[in-house]
């Protein structure tokens, strides 16, 4: 029972502070890898890849995954509810006071101040995810330069060929899978 409450409360905290959507939840999801054994950093990087190619936001998919891995279907439902309930509460409050809220100079100022912080949080998270997903070796060491160089060369080469940009994104996803398998990114 303690784990159920813990899942709910941890993801509820994330739901309240995740201003900026799915990518803004990354630092908090990373923090959970250090606090609990619900999922590993490798699980998180894999889930990011899956979340970016499936419907639904990253935080929601990760909450469901962590809960399901920890306590099965019930855990998935509890952790997902914990993440979603704060958004529902905030949206209901905003909708109730929208007339006064929309043009308030303090609210506009607060959102203007929050934007750079969200960008910084997302940038720090991207750095950590790239470090694990692109540079980590199976023995725990990091070898950044060879894989990064190969990735940069591939991306640069593809951007130079204009007629390749017209292909459907699904083909690019398939190509990325093949490159990942071949180079074991």
Image (spheres, helix red, strand yellow):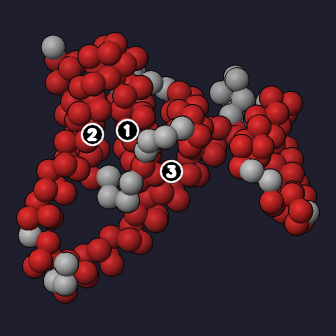
- At mark 2, the secondary structure is helix
Cα–Cα gap, marks 3 and 1? 17 Å
Q: Tell me what residue is drawn at x 53 percent, y 33 percent.
A: 47
Q: Please, is residue 40 above or below residue 91 in the view?
A: above
As drawn, the label of residue 60 is 1
Q: Tell me what residue is drawn at x 37 percent, y 28 percent.
A: 64
Residue 130 is left or right of residue 125, and the answer is: right
Residue 8 image position (x, y, % from top left): 21, 30
Instruction: Count numbered badges in the picture.
Output: 3
Marks 2/1 in contact by CB < 8 Å: the verdict is: yes
Cα–Cα gap, marks 2 and 3? 19 Å
Residue 94 image position (x, y, % from top left): 15, 64
Q: Tell me what residue is drawn at x 41 percent, y 72 percent.
A: 116
Q: Tell me what residue is drawn at x 58 percent, y 52 percent.
A: 127
Mark closer to the chain start, 3 or 1: 1
Q: Please, is residue 9 above or below residue 172 in the view?
A: above
Q: Please, is residue 10 above or below residue 78 in the view?
A: below
Marks 3/1 in contact by CB < 8 Å: the verdict is: no
Mark closer to the chain start, 2 or 1: 1
Question: Is residue 176 at all visible to an observer of this figure?
Answer: no
As drawn, the label of residue 83 is 2
Residue 180 is left or right of residue 40, and the answer is: right
Mark closer to the chain start, 2 or 3: 2
Residue position marked by numbered label 3 in the rendering: 125
> Which is closer to the viewer, label 2 or label 3?
2
- At mark 3, the secondary structure is helix
């Amino acid at each position: 029972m303690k784990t159920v409450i813990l899942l709910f409360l941890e993801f509820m905290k994330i739901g309240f502070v995740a201003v900026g959507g799915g990518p803004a939840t990354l630092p908090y999801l990373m923090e959970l890898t250090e606090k609990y054994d619900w999922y590993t950093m490798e699980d998180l990087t894999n889930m990011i890849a899956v979340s970016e190619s499936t419907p639904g936001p990253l935080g929601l998919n990760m909450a469901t995954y962590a809960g399901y891995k920890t306590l099965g279907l019930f855990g998935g439902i509890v952790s997902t509810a914990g993440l979603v309930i704060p958004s529902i509460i905030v949206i209901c409050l905003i909708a109730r006071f929208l007339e006064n809220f929309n043009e308030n100079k303090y609210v506009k100022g607060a959102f203007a101040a929050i934007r750079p912080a969200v960008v910084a949080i997302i940038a720090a998270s991207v750095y950590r995810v790239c470090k694990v997903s692109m540079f980590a070796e199976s023995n725990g060491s990091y070898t950044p330069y060879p894989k990064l160089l190969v990735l940069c060369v591939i991306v640069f080469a593809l951007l130079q060929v204009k007629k390749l940009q017209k292909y459907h994104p699904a083909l690019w996803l398939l190509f990325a899978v093949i490159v990942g398998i071949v180079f074991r990114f």
